[in-house]
Image: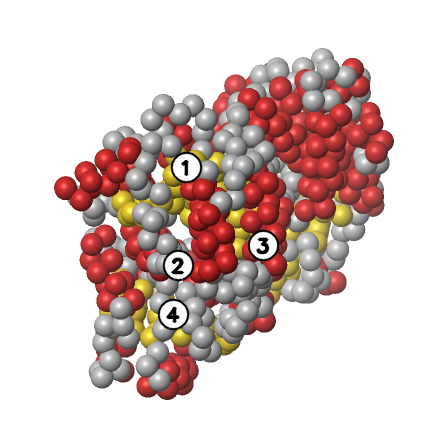
Amino acid sequence: MFNPQTEIKYLTGVGPQRAELLEKEIGVHTFGDMLTYYPYRYVDRSKVYRIAEIDGNMPYVQLVGQIVSMEPIGEGRSRRLVGRFSDGTGFIDLVWFQGLKFVGKAYKVRTRYLIFGKPTVFNGKLQINHPDIETVEENVDIPEIQGNTFRPHYHTTDRMKKGFLASAAVAKLIGNLFKLITEPLPETLSQWIVDEYHLMPYDEAMHNIHFPTSADSLRRAQARLKFDELFYIQLGILRYAMNRKQKQGGLVFQTVGANFNTFYHDHLPFSLTEAQKRVIREIRQDMRAGFQMNRLLQGDVGSGKTLVALLCSLIAIDNGYQVVIMAPTEILAEQHLETIRGLLSGMPQLRIELLTGSVKGKRRKEILDSLIEGKVHILIGTHAVIEDNVQFRNLGLAIIDEQHRFGVAQRAKLWDKRTGMKTPPHVLVMTATPIPRTLAMTLYGDLDVSVIDQLPPGRKPIHTIHQFLKHMDRIHEAMRTELKKGRQIYVVFPLIEDTEKMDLENLEEGYQQMREAFPEYKVSRVHGKLKSAEKDAEMSRFASGETQILVATTVIEVGVNVPNASVMIIMNAERFGLSQLHQLRGRVGRGAEQSYCVLVTKYELSETTRKRIQIMVDSTDGFEIAEADLKLRGPGDLEGTQQSGMAFDLKIANIARDGQILTYARTAAQHLLDTDPTESLPENLTCWKHLSQLHSDINWGAIS
């Protein structure tokens, strides 16, 4: 009898030892876990090839024959085990680089095997690395082997393989599980959703995801189970957001008053773009609606987010409230202070202060006292603003820059910053990291999203060039041309944990090369290993124009604004993600002059890397680049948005590729909430019950 809660050790073919392996290696504890351990690929196993028919350009193939010899080759890291395999029409090498002892014992010479894998050519010989192998009885004909069209393949680990739990064994266990299922598996969605979106019934989908009867039934099963997964994530997020709005009242900013109007009409440095105006309207609507605003403001580097944040701050001030702006680094906080004081220079009645770890003693006490008295209108700072002794008289708006650099718990501390106020401040989260729509829907699903998708007039697009390392002399020549015009230059090196020591050596070498190549100019260097004070001092020297070339790691990715810097040279650009390259490129192009970004790579690049570099050369649109990055790399690699960092695991859906299904799932979830807000309609009981079972352990508030 099938019960999803039954421990996996009770499944035929498992037992205590294998159960321990399944639990430790792939997190399968129960029958239900095993059922939702989906294959990662399927292979059409309807054809058995002859070795004489295959070449190194073919996809996966299967062969039937014997291993005629088995011998270890090479020493140390290059040691491998090579089995010579023949079917009478030719020979192919089977090669193993890992688990050599296990393979040597498991597979025997002169035994008939069914081999499956991807053929390649090495040193003129055909080979298959780490093939799947199954024993075939001598009396079984090839037509019989060709019976099963689609074979599922499951991810397994080396430890599982050593315990004889390779993909074929996992498939067998799942087959044993289906033998226990004597009645159709219960439906997980309301019938109207299944009908509305033409979804395959759940029971049929579960059978076809593991053992598909045709290519079409597999496609429909995948679509159904992806929909399920994304639907319940969206329903959980949307329900959380709706409940929060209902329970959590918000400050009402009714007035657009003197400060806003004076600045807008008399001090605005340039006309707002239509995108900026639209975003301000959206924020204004939130701030007077009577619930707490939680809005994500996305805008490419240089799109004018700071100006939007300032105008919204003036609305809060006009309604008698204070504003805090949190930045991830001291230098960025100082930059915000300088920008905002500059913009408000004609309005001396407004007091703007800076609070970072460097502000100490008497000056610090004076700022803290003025905050409680309500004399400071805008406080700009780092995480120092959330320290326990920082209290506001009436904090009304919290603006958080580069949100992924602050943890949820850190931001929640802002709620306790008002002496005697029960209603939380409005929250505006800003990011210059363009987040693809599908990812924003999931990672920031409970935040309303505004996008500034226009650059202010007069900005010249940055000209991006791809150069190879061997042409450094050309690059130096171009750098000298810009330096002679009085411009400044960034030279960025990668710094990745696994290769940190080597990367720092490369940066040091690059720094020395720049000093030798440009003896008449001053060069400074910055990396994460420097103390904060040293780092800030070096950045400040560059920002003030004292040094002309800044050699750095990605610590300059977010932050310093140097309008005179017109060239960004990114060394080993192939080692950066697209979104990171785009962020780095955004450090230049801040002044009126034409700016350049040079992506320097080695000559030998993979096809995917060439595509990524070409996207950078062709496009300056951050959202287009972020979408491409998501498709090429998947969500697991996006900085600040790791799929592993989500509050949930995706077993079958892929945010990068399943955007259309995600949109349908969100629409269905929203419709369910709109039509059944009290969760009481009989036709939706299945959905509400399933949601509570599925996600009882998820803290929805932690998602954004």
Q: Which mark is residue 321?
A: 1
Residue bearing mark 2: 343
Coordinates of residue 144 in the picture (x, y in percent) = 81, 41
- SS of the residue under disc 2: helix
Tell me which label, 1 or 2, sits earlier in the chain: 1
Front-lying residue, 350 or 221: 350
Coordinates of residue 417 in the picture (x, y in percent) = 35, 31
As measured in the structure, the alpha-carbon distance from the residue carrying label 1 to the one carrying label 2 is 20 Å
**Amino acid found under the numbered disc labelled 1:** Tyr
**Amino acid found under the numbered disc labelled 2:** Leu
Tell me which label, 1 or 3, sits earlier in the chain: 3
As measured in the structure, the alpha-carbon distance from the residue carrying label 2 to the one carrying label 3 is 18 Å
Query: For residue 470, which quarter of the picture?
Result: bottom left
**Amino acid found under the numbered disc labelled 3:** Lys
Q: Check disc 4: other Cα within 10 Å, few if <14, some if 14-19, many if 20+.
A: some
As measured in the structure, the alpha-carbon distance from the residue carrying label 1 to the one carrying label 3 is 22 Å
Q: Check disc 1: other Cα within 10 Å, few if <14, some if 14-19, many if 20+.
A: many
Q: Tell me the mark number nearer the camera, choosing from 1 and 3.
A: 1
Q: For the view shown, which residue lies furthest in the top direction?
A: 1
